Amino acid sequence: MSVRVLIADDHPVVRDGLAALLSTVPGMEGAGTASSGREAVRATVVLAPDVLVLDIQMPEMSGIDAAREVAAAAPGVAVLMLTMYEDDESVFAAMCAGPAGEPFPELTPREREVLGLIAAGHGNASIGARLSLAPKTVGNHIS
């Protein structure tokens, strides 16, 4: 049985290149492509892929918003986000938007709070001051 993958990217070279690469991987099968966030959601619902490869920056609807809609409409579809952006905020938002329900269920509420502050760009000392924790305790939560 092969894994069916839908590729959503607004750049034709990237989209077609990923589709061509995917066709060479044993056990993988292209389920289709989409060129916008809105189209990605529609294609996911109609084509029911196993995996949606989704660019974060898309026209009509961001990949993050599309991932949220996919999570609600097709919760069994795994979402793999692609991005050229290196900012923590985009990466954290993408991780929280996926169909896994609550992100990082293994984290304690305090660890989740620390993760949110890291994503907002705070360092250990700043996080410690905000949460009344020693920086070493913050480091332990991060670990």
Image (spheres, grey):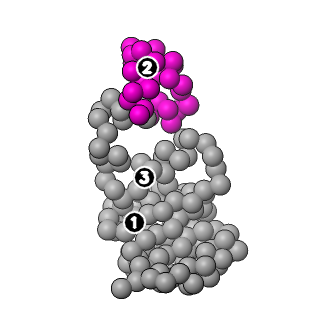
Task: State yes or no: residue 10 in magenta.
Answer: no
Mark 1, secondary structure of its residue? strand
Q: Which residue is mark 2?
A: 136
Task: Tell me whether the residue at label 2 lies in contact with that at label 1, contact meaning CB atoms closer than 8 angstroms.
Answer: no
Disc 2 marks a residue whose amino acid type is Lys
Mark 3, secondary structure of its residue? helix
Which label is found at residue 98? none
Q: Locate residue 70, reporting x and y percent.
A: 40, 64
The mark that comes first in sequence, 3 or 2, is 3
Disc 1 marks a residue whose amino acid type is Ala
The mark that comes first in sequence, 2 or 1, is 1
Instruction: Give left or right: position of 130 versus 101.
Output: right
Q: Tell me which segment is drawn in magenta.
A: 116-143
Task: Tell me whether the residue at label 1 lies in contact with that at label 3, contact meaning CB atoms closer than 8 angstroms.
Answer: no
Instruction: Give left or right: position of 32 versus 86.
Output: left
Q: Nearest to the eye among marks 1 and 3: give it.
A: 1
The mark that comes first in sequence, 1 or 3, is 1
Give the prevailing secondary structure in the magenta stretch: helix
Q: Residue at x 48, y 62 (%)?
A: 80
Q: Locate residue 38, reporting x and y percent.
A: 51, 67
In which quadrant is the C terminus drawn?
top left
Instruction: Give left or right: position of 21 versus 71.
Output: right
Q: Quadrant of residue 47?
A: bottom left
Mark 2, secondary structure of its residue? helix
Q: Locate residue 82, reporting x and y percent.
A: 57, 60
Q: Locate residue 92, reporting x and y percent.
A: 49, 44
Disc 3 marks a residue whose amino acid type is Ala
Q: Which residue is mark 1?
A: 78
Residue 1 shows in the view: yes
Q: Which residue is mark 3?
A: 97
